Image (cartoon, rainbow, N blue to C red):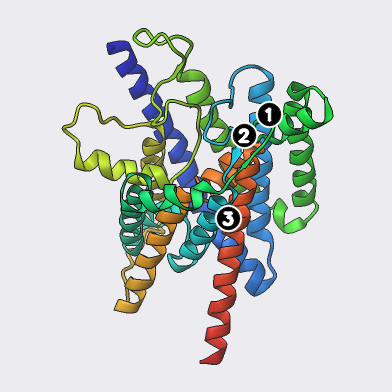
Amino acid sequence: MEEELIATRTIAWLGFAVGVLFGAVGNRTNFCTMGAISDIMHMGDWTRMRMWLLAIAVAMVGVSLLRATGLVTIEGSLYGGNEVRWLSGLLGGGMFGVGMVLASGCGSKTLIRIGGGNLKSVVVFVVMGLAAFMTMRGIFAVWRVSTIDQVSVTLDAEQYLPTLVGAWSGMDPAALALWLPMAFGAALIAFVLAHREARTFDSLLGGIGIGLAVVAGWYVTGHIGYVPEHPETLETAFVGTAGNRPESLSLVAPSAQLLELFMYWSDASQFLAFGMAAALGIFAGSLAYAVISGGYREEMFPNAADLKRHALGGLLMGVGGVTGLGCTIGQGLTGISTLSVGSFITVAGIVIGAAATLKYEYWKLMRE
């Protein structure tokens, strides 16, 4: 038991380190999915979107190499299974997309902004965490499980694209698990680097740094934290993870779990899992960079309308992130790195929700 406690602390510290990398790089490069969509719609600028696509490519290639070398298995992760809850993905993603526009950024951007001194984002984080908790285990969970989660499609194999293509074509799934993400990753990298603005230092740092943080997360939980036979249960275990399965960066559920940990600190069953530690690391990394670079600036709501807007955004991100099983990081990077069908559906919902909200706000502004 003592050895497991030590291992759990090790995973937490490593998760914190991964988060620090993410937070510092994200602050330096202004990495933001909502901002990337906004840049395209309002200015026709694809720079930040190419940074996000580069991060996806690096994560895809990295995860495929981890799997090919036997260092990590993603089977049993949140993104697998043969049941695709497509309606939950679309609606949950859509709600998250709307919420991140109202809240001026997604979950990761919220933590980065807190580190930079933005007090508005503290409110967003707390509301997002409470809403996520209610959607995981509270009143919203009853509605979610009994309604939209009931709508699903059952596939013939696990919903990872290499597995599905292998089952449908008769090709070797193990080979596809290596070459399919490598091909997708190479195509994305070629698209990104073909444009001069994507070859600047900050763009490359943001894409490669964030992508490697996702890969590192999979390695920490899926390799370092992997126990073939737990001494008590005699079953496979992934020490230091909230769900006892391999995972990487995701921020909506960990925000709820962090609040629960802080509220029930004396409960011996509570522990600082990888995702929670990574969230704290993102804040710490952003704070460190903001202080060192002289960019730390405290900011508060100018009026009640702005407070209500950000609180509503946090609420929608919390509900939507849990319903869609992830956010722009949990699904948009970590999930997509596995080539999960469900992740592509949720990301589509996020982009549609964000784009529609940005379009509506621009239309409303033009009418004033």
Q: Secondary structure at mark 1?
A: helix
Q: Secondary structure at mark 3?
A: helix
| Residue type beneath disc 2 | Asn
Q: Quadrant of the N terminus?
A: top left
Q: Is residue 94 left or right of residue 64?
A: left
Residue at 43% in and 40% down = 20
* Residue 35 position within the rendered picture, expressed as x and y whole percent measured from the top left: 56, 63
Residue corresponding to mark 3: 90
Camera-side residue: 136 or 184?
A: 136
* Residue 108 position within the rendered picture, expressed as x and y whole percent measured from the top left: 46, 51
Which quadrant of the structure image shows residue 42? bottom right
Q: Secondary structure at mark 2?
A: loop
Camera-side residue: 355 or 85?
A: 85
Residue corresponding to mark 1: 64
Give the mark toward the camera: 1 or 2. Answer: 2
Give above or below for 290 relative to 310. Answer: above
Q: Marks 3 and 2, how far apart in space?
A: 17 Å
Q: Are marks 3 and 2 in contact (CB under 8 Å)?
A: no
* Residue 166 position within the rendered picture, expressed as x and y whole percent measured from the top left: 78, 28
Q: Marks 1 and 2, how far apart in space?
A: 20 Å
- Categorize mark 2 by other alpha carbons within 10 Å: few (<14), some (14-19), many (20+): some
Q: Is residue 293 visible?
A: no
Residue corresponding to mark 2: 82
